[in-house]
Image: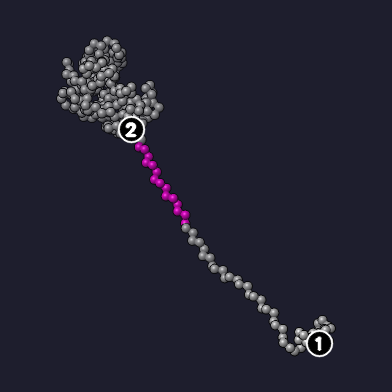
């Protein structure tokens, strides 16, 4: 049954059987709202990352390979060879080093090879330190020299006639060149110029000083003219002078505040024996941090 409800002005239908379609006039009911569309954002295409290739680090240059030492006069000429307590050396088992003539470029050597090389430079019979230019004569010190004894002399021997004595370790019995009773004279070396011999002695000390070793040079003949080169004054010791190639300078060691240090002095390559101011040219080469001694100027 259908009945119009005047209060609401709508048609009320009663008793409609489910599933029966009823048609009627009137104002149609509003349509249900359309569903609101869901916004789906458009995906912005992602630009793939640009891969920067890894840079292979450049390998630094290898350190230069140190040139092996060649133990020969030709390879080391101009260098100064010496003993030292540096790097674990001792006075009984020294380390061996070379340096430039101004004290720079110090380099340690193999001890056994350096000692054999030093012997070849300094041996009485085959060395170069004590031989007269041309080889006719050699100057030698005492084989055994006791400090405080009767004295230690210096000798000049004929390289041929006295070869047997030079090659032995016997005491030298002839050929005296310089001697004074109670005087220590040692370590002679013949100048490459041939004009004089340099040596160490304590026979003359600067005025007012206690007896001390100093460096001297003398003419290589009987009754030599001798001049003192240094001014050491206080019972110090000096030793082992060695000439440079032309004989104008010599290197040696001297005690300095309890340490043996290496010095160089201008001694003159000519017959000029006015050496009153030679000591003013003395320059220290070693650094005062260790014992350095027995230098040999390779020539």
Residue 1 visible to the viewer: yes
- The part of the image, by quadrant, that contains residue 278 is top left
**Relative to 57, 288 lies left or right:** left
Mark number for residue 120?
Answer: none
Name which of mark 2 and mark 1 comes first in the sequence: 1
- The part of the image, by quadrant, that contains residue 122 is top left
Per the image, is 65 magenta? Answer: yes
User: How far apart are the two marked residues, 2 and 1, measured between alpha carbons?
Assistant: 130 Å
At x 20%, y 20%, the residue is 228
Residue at disc 1, secondary structure: strand
Per the image, is 80 magenta? Answer: no
According to the picture, the residue beneath numbered tag 1 turns out to be 3
Characterize the local packing of mark 2: few (<14), some (14-19) or many (20 or more) Cα atoms within 10 angstroms.
some
Position in image of residue 94 (x %, y %): 37, 25
Which quadrant does the C terminus fall into? Answer: top left
Where is 159 relative to 182, above or below?
below
According to the picture, the residue beneath numbered tag 2 turns out to be 106
At x 18%, y 23%, the residue is 276
Residue at disc 2, secondary structure: loop
Characterize the local packing of mark 1: few (<14), some (14-19) or many (20 or more) Cα atoms within 10 angstroms.
few
At x 28%, y 13%, the residue is 171
Which residues, given as a range, are shown in magenta? Answer: 53-67
């Amino acid at each position: 049954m259908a009945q119009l409800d005047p209060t609401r002005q709508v048609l009320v239908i009663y008793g409609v059987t489910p599933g029966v379609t009823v048609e009627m006039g009137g104002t149609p009911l509003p349509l249900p709202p359309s569903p609101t569309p869901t916004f789906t954002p458009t995906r912005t295409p992602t630009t793939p990352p640009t891969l920067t290739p890894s840079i292979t680090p450049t390998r630094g240059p290898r350190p230069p390979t140190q040139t092996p030492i060649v133990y020969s006069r030709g390879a080391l000429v101009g260098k100064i060879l010496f003993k030292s307590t540096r790097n674990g050396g001792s006075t009984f088992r020294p380390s061996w080093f070379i340096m430039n003539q101004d004290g720079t470029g110090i380099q340690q050597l193999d001890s056994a090879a350096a000692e054999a090389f030093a012997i070849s430079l300094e041996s009485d019979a085959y060395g170069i330190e004590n031989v007269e230019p041309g080889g006719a004569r050699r100057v030698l010190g005492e084989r055994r020299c006791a400090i405080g004894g009767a004295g230690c002399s210096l000798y000049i021997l004929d390289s041929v006639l006295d070869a047997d004595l030079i090659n032995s370790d016997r005491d030298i019995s002839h050929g005296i060149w310089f001697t004074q009773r109670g005087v220590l004279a040692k370590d002679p070396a013949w100048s490459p110029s041939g004009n004089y011999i340099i040596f160490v002695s304590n026979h003359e000390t600067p005025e007012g000083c206690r007896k001390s070793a100093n460096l001297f040079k003398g003419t290589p003949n009987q009754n030599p003219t001798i001049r003192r080169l240094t001014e050491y004054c206080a019972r110090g010791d000096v030793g082992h002078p060695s000439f440079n190639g032309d004989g104008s300078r010599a290197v040696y060691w001297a005690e300095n505040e309890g340490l043996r240090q290496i010095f160089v002095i201008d001694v003159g390559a000519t017959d000029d024996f006015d050496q009153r101011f030679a000591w003013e040219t003395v320059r220290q080469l070693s650094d005062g941090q260790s014992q350095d001694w027995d230098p040999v100027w390779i020539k």
